[in-house]
Structure formats: structure tokens, C-alpha cells
Amino acid sequence: MRYRAAILVPLAAVSVVAAVATAVAAAEPAQPPPCRQVTHENARHTVCEVDLTKQAIKLYWKRPDGQPYGHLGRLPAADAANRKLRFAFNGGMFHADLSPVGLYIENGAQMKAASTAKGPGNFHLKPNGIFYLAGTKAGVMETGAYLKSAPKADLATQSGPMLVINGKLHPLFVRAGTSAKMRDGVGVKADGRTVVFAISEDPVSFAAFGRLFRDELKTPNALFLDGGSAPALYAPAMSRGGNFLPLGPMLGVYGP
């Protein structure tokens, strides 16, 4: 009788522990998807907002071995504070060797200087700009204004063109035509603590994409990051697996 009791007690204890674990798991709220769908001017977009009081943004280019990460799904799954990677995004324009075209600051260290040169392509459709993070505040500034103010940035990436500048669309968008392509970009709300990333799921013009940030997303300053046939987003909770072709700079968002 003692032998059988010795067996039954542990089994009962295991059942209680399992029931408690199940109840705790059920009580934990499911994390909502990191992004949402927005339709603006009849075009679909995926929009991802970041609250810098709760989440952290990291900028990546090279792995510890010196080689570029290349793919969003290869970024660290958790940061130093053990926060999970919620989503990852293209971090700006790059050369064929995946090096940044312009300013690149990672963890407070400048690895590439800002570019003020003239040239072809979207990056040089002046004014271009810089997305940066300094402490718990983020910003998007036109390149000249950024260099003049010289904020002490923890991360910064330069791209172009600017989409919205102090509440106004880029002055050359009227002359840029109506070319419609897939595009992605970043804006910062007036509080400096809310960063908004967006990808167009339908081809849109620069002007329409700028109006999305200004009118729908309420960001007084916004920057075009890149575009093409399929802008990249890595978001496992949404079954978005990232990029097919290698990328240079990449932004990862970590949090609960």
C-alpha cells in the first residue's frame, strides 16, 4: 500500500503543476501582430509603429565576422536585454557590396560618413535625409539640417529622397512624374518617441507615398528608404519572411 501511494502522489503533483502551467499560459495575453494594414488613396500598405518607451530599434550591417548580414531573418533573435525581434526592415540604400551609400552610425560608432555629393538615382534626389535615434528620441532630418545640428546619435542611416519635410512634401515630387513602384520608408511623429515604418503593397508614386506619411500616419518628417519590385519586411508573427535579394543596412525592432 505504501508503494502504490508513493507512485500516486508524484503523479497527482505533476497533474497539478501541468494544470497551473496551462492556466498561466492561458492568462498571458497573446501579443498582437507588430504591423497593421492601411489603405490610403486606394493603395494597400503595411504599417509598423514603434513606441520607443517600450521597444528598441537596432541598426545592423555586418556580423561579428565582418561579413554583411544580408538577410533580415539572420538578425539576432533577441537583443542584449533579451527582448525578442518583433520585425525587421530595410535600413536604407546600399552599394553592390552591401555597404551603405551614406551616413551609417551603429551603437554610437560612425562607420560611414554622410554623403552630400550630387549624383543620379533616388538617393541624390535632394534633399535627401537621415533617420536617427539619440537616446529615447528619434528623428528624420534633411541631411544639411542634420549635419548642422549634429545630434549625438546612437544610430543613423542616410537615404533619399525625403518624403515629408516639416509637414510639406518634397518640392520635386511634382516634377518627378507619376511613376508608380513599391516603396518603403520611415517617419517620426511629433513626440519623437513614435517611429512609423511603412511598405506599399501596391505600386505608388513618391507623392502618394509622402501623403501617406503626412496625412494618414501624421508624421511631419519622413524618409524614403528603398523600393523596387518587393520591399522587404521580416515579421514572423505575420508570416513575412523577409528579403530574397541581399540587403545592406537593416533595422530590427525588439520588444515584448
Image (spheres, helix red, strand yellow):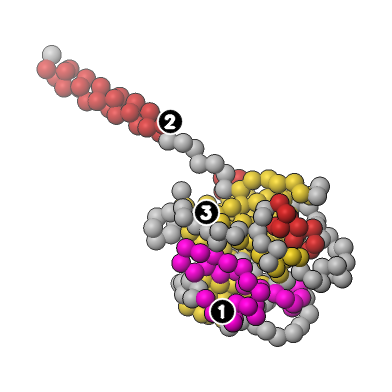
Q: Check disc 1 and give the amino acid type.
A: Ser
Residue 39: x percent and y percent?
A: 75, 46
Q: Residue tagged by mark 3?
A: 51
* Nearer to me, 66 or 202: 202
Left or right of 112 on screen, residue 38 = right
Q: Amino acid at mark 3?
A: Asp
> How far apart, in angstroms, are the residues tagged by discs 1 and 2?
50 Å
- Position of 253 relative to 24 (above/below): below
Q: Is residue 202 left or right of residue 186?
A: right
Q: Amino acid at mark 2?
A: Ala
Task: Name the residue beneath numbered marker 1.
Answer: 149
Q: Is residue 254 left or right of residue 182?
A: left
Q: Is there CB contact under 8 Å for labels 2 and 3?
A: no
- CA separation, marks 1 and 3? 24 Å
Query: Which of the image's four quarters has the N terminus?
Result: top left
Counting residues from the start of the chain, the first of labels 2 and 3 encountered is: 2
Segment colored magenta? 122-151
* Residue drawn at 11 percent across, 17 percent down: 2
Q: Looking at the picture, tell me which residue is in the foreground, 109 or 16.
A: 109
Regarding mark 1 in the picture, which secondary structure is present there?
helix
Does label 1 or label 3 sit earlier along the sequence? 3
Query: Of the numbered discs in the image, which one, if any, rests on residue 115?
Result: none
The answer to whether residue 254 is above or below residue 148 is: above
- Crowding near the residue tagged with mark 3, few <14, some 14–19, many ≥20 C-alpha atoms within 10 Å: some
Q: Which residue is mark 2?
A: 26
Identify the residue shown where x is 64% and y is 61%. 187
* Vertical position of residue 5 compared to residue 122: above or below: above
